[in-house]
Amino acid sequence: MHAAPKVIMLPSRGGLRLRCLTAGLILMAAVAIPRPAEAQVLFVVCDNGLRCVQAPCPSKDVVLVPSGRRYAKTDPDLSGLPAADAARRDLASGLYYGRLVLSGTVEDGPPVRITATKILRRATAHEAALCRRR
């Protein structure tokens, strides 16, 4: 019986170059695609009853209006509020009882980041009631 001849094939450098070029083009295309603008959402901020002796203390929940989706133990970032909104007298109590409707952005992911950009109005009775539902 005759033994089959062994053929040893060396990897072609052209194939490697083509793969690197393709990977580079895909990476450049992914970077060049503009990310969609974050959509503004409406939400109320509610006290969740949690008390801490040391910061940070996630003592608030954020509830999206009108869906009612609750982000538990999440304090919104209020640094994006305009100066007039940040200086409101009812800001602290409005956030404690869910009396104010804010607009802002939600960045899902660990951890969830919610940024308030504006106080829109006082909450309706239905919107404030979202705070009492668990």
Image (cartoon, rainbow, N blue to C red):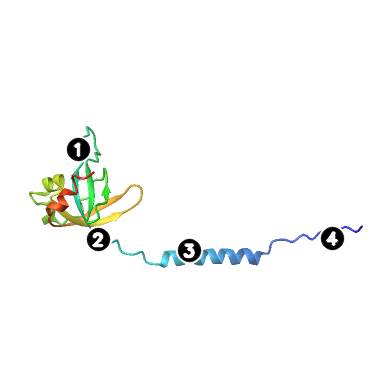
State which mark lies toward you, 1 or 4.
Answer: 1
Q: Nearer the viewer, residue 97 or 19?
A: 97
The image's mark for residue 40 is 2
Q: Earlier in the sequence, mark 3 or mark 4?
A: 4
Q: How would you rate the neighbour count of disc 2 (Cα within 10 Å): few for under 14, some for 14-19, many for 20 or more?
A: some
Q: Mark 3 to mark 1: distance in Å?
A: 47 Å
* Closer mark to the observer between disc 2 and disc 3: 2
Q: Residue furthest right?
A: 1
Q: Is residue 76 visible?
A: no
Q: CA distance from mark 4 to mark 2?
A: 69 Å
Question: Residue visible at 23% across and 50% down?
Answer: 63
The residue where tag 1 is placed is 49
Secondary structure, mark 4, is loop
* CA distance separating discs 1 and 2: 27 Å
Q: Residue at x 10, y 51 (%)?
A: 87
User: How far across and down, in percent of the image, does residue 53 sit?
Assistant: 22, 32
Label 3 SS: helix
The amino acid type found where label 1 is placed reads: Gly
Which of discs 4 and 2 lies nearer the camera? The answer is 2
State the CA–CA distance, disc 3 to disc 4.
42 Å
Q: Quadrant of the N terminus?
A: bottom right
Quadrant where the C terminus lies?
A: top left
Foreground: disc 1 or disc 2? 1
Disc 2 marks a residue whose amino acid type is: Gln
The mark found on residue 27 in the picture is: 3
| 3 and 4 marks in contact (CB < 8 Å) | no
Looking at the rendered structure, the secondary structure element under dot 1 is loop
Neighbourhood count class around disc 1 (C-alpha, 10 Å): few under 14, some 14–19, many 20 upward? few
The residue wearing badge 4 is 5
Kindly report the distance in space between the C-alpha atoms of the residues bearing marks 2 and 3. Answer: 29 Å
